[in-house]
Amino acid sequence: MLYEQSDAHFQRGDLAQAELFAREALKEAESSLGEGSRATELSLARATFTLRLAGKLDEALALAARGVKVAAKLHGPDDPQSALALQNQAEVLFAQKKYGAAEQLHRRALAIFQKKYGEKNFQTATSLHNVGTMLLAQDKYVEAERFLKRALAVKEQVLKPGHRSISHTLNNLVIALEAQNKNAEAGKFRARAAEVDKQQAEPAKKPRPAVKPKAI
């Protein structure tokens, strides 16, 4: 299957071939099953992903917008699949540094996940983290801190200790706190992030770079 071949090439680090097969998978799905099919929905998401990584952001954004429409038609606008499509579009906007627009899409996704799954769910935690990260990118540190702390609380309940996603939220929280000169509290979260990193099963540890906002 072309879609699976795209993923296989991506896993091997061959982005050019991953993009090529993603485009072919989308063409095949559109021609054989039509715009409103599940195969087209998945192929749009894959093509958006590969194009975003390739830096072809305008094309990626157009495909992401199509993906949102297809997901809403297939599943309904308040379905978690539609929320995932919104997140996909938001990631492209983030790459374009359109942080406010990305924030709004992540907030819409968050509302969907909260309604469907409640607060104590990984998808909800992911959306909380994403909203916090968009706020962080806009220098809205107080509000970013609030969302990131909510995300952290949920992640620590639903994930195993040492999960990389917990570290991402901790690191972003450090940035939000340091920007507010809450250095003592930031130091505590930095220490917790270091402890999480130690728990990650990696064959070799690399020096940690300067802390930057991270997505999930």
Image (tube, rainbow, N blue to C red):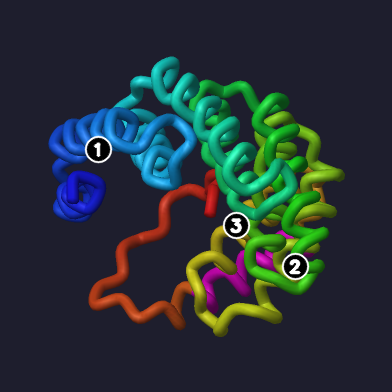
The kind of residue on which mark 2 rests is Tyr
Marks 3/1: CA–CA distance: 37 Å
Residue annotated with mark 2: 117
Residue 32 occupies which quadrant of the picture?
A: top left
- Label 1 close to label 2 by CB (< 8 Å): no
Residue 43 occupies which quadrant of the picture?
A: top left
Residue 86: mark = none
Magenta range is 184-196
Q: Position of residue 91 (x, y in %)?
A: 53, 36
Residue 25: mark = 1
Q: Earlier in the sequence, mark 3 or mark 1?
A: 1
Q: Is residue 95 visible?
A: yes
* Magenta portion: prevailing SS class: helix
Q: Tell me if residue 125 is in the magenta stretch.
A: no
Crowd class of label 3 (few under 14; some 14 to 19; many from 20; radius 10 Å) = many
Looking at the image, residue 82 lies above or below residue 187: above
Q: Residue at x 42, y 21 (%)?
A: 57
Q: Position of residue 122 (x, y in %)?
A: 64, 68
Crowd class of label 1 (few under 14; some 14 to 19; many from 20; radius 10 Å) = many
Marks 1/2: CA–CA distance: 32 Å
Looking at the image, residue 138 lies above or below residue 37: above
Residue 161 occupies which quadrant of the picture?
A: bottom right
> Is label 1 or label 2 in front?
1
The kind of residue on which mark 3 rests is Asn
Q: Position of residue 29 (x, y in %)?
A: 31, 37
